[in-house]
Image (cartoon, rainbow, N blue to C red):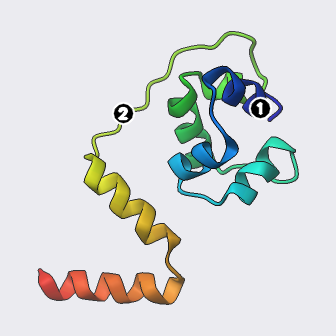
């Protein structure tokens, strides 16, 4: 995952900016850049879309940027809502889901 550092710098982004875009903590992103931990497949897809490169390029399988086939049909409000939901504790997420079910 060495390429994360290079791609982030090419885009002129801070670790914090990428972390916010990914709905994760800066520490988690820092761990990815320093290869202490690895992103999930879904997170790799999001990174691919964010940086405009293929997942194969991100993980070092190719030196070609490749094409990105990720479609995001979410509105900005929906994306923000997902980010806020993910930041909640599991207990709070459960409460939110209960509220949503009661609103149906």
**80 horizontally vs 14: left or right:** left
For image coordinates 28% across by 40% down, the residue present is 73
Determine the image quadrant of residue 15: top right
Residue 102 higher or lower than 73, as above or below: below
Q: Which residue is mark 1?
A: 5
Q: Nearer the viewer, residue 56 or 65?
A: 65
Horizontal and vertical percent position of residue 17:
58, 44
For mark 2, give the secondary structure: loop
Determine the image quadrant of residue 60: top right
Residue contact between numbered discs 1 and 2, judged by CB atoms under 8 Å: no
Residue 56 higher or lower than 80, as above or below: above
Horizontal and vertical percent position of residue 12:
63, 26
Residue 95 higher or lower than 52, as above or below: below
Q: Quadrant of the N terminus?
A: top right
For image coordinates 44% across by 61% down, the residue present is 83
Residue 91 higher or lower than 12, as above or below: below
Q: Which residue is mark 2?
A: 71
Q: Looking at the image, which residue sits at the far top?
A: 64
For image coordinates 52% across by 33% down, the residue present is 50
Which label belongs to residue 64? none
Q: Is residue 11 visible?
A: yes
Q: Nearer the viewer, residue 60 or 5?
A: 5
Q: Nearer the viewer, residue 68 or 34?
A: 34
Alpha-carbon span between mark 1 and mark 2: 24 Å
**Marks 1, 2: nearer the viewer:** 1
Circle nearer the N terminus (1, 2) = 1
Horizontal and vertical percent position of residue 22:
55, 49
Q: Residues within 10 Å of mark 2 (few under 14, many from 20)?
A: few
Q: Residues within 10 Å of mark 1 (few under 14, many from 20)?
A: some
For mark 1, give the secondary structure: helix
């Amino acid at each position: 995952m060495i390429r994360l550092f290079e791609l982030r710098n090419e885009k002129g982004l801070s670790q914090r900016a990428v972390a916010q875009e990914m709905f994760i903590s800066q520490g988690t992103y820092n761990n990815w850049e320093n290869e202490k931990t690895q992103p999930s497949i879904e997170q790799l897809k999001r990174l691919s879309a964010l940086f405009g490169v293929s997942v194969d390029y991100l993980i070092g399988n190719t030196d070609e940027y490749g094409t990105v086939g990720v479609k995001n049909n979410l509105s900005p409000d929906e994306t923000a809502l997902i980010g806020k939901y993910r930041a909640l504790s599991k207990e709070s997420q459960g409460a939110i889901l209960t509220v949503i079910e009661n609103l149906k």
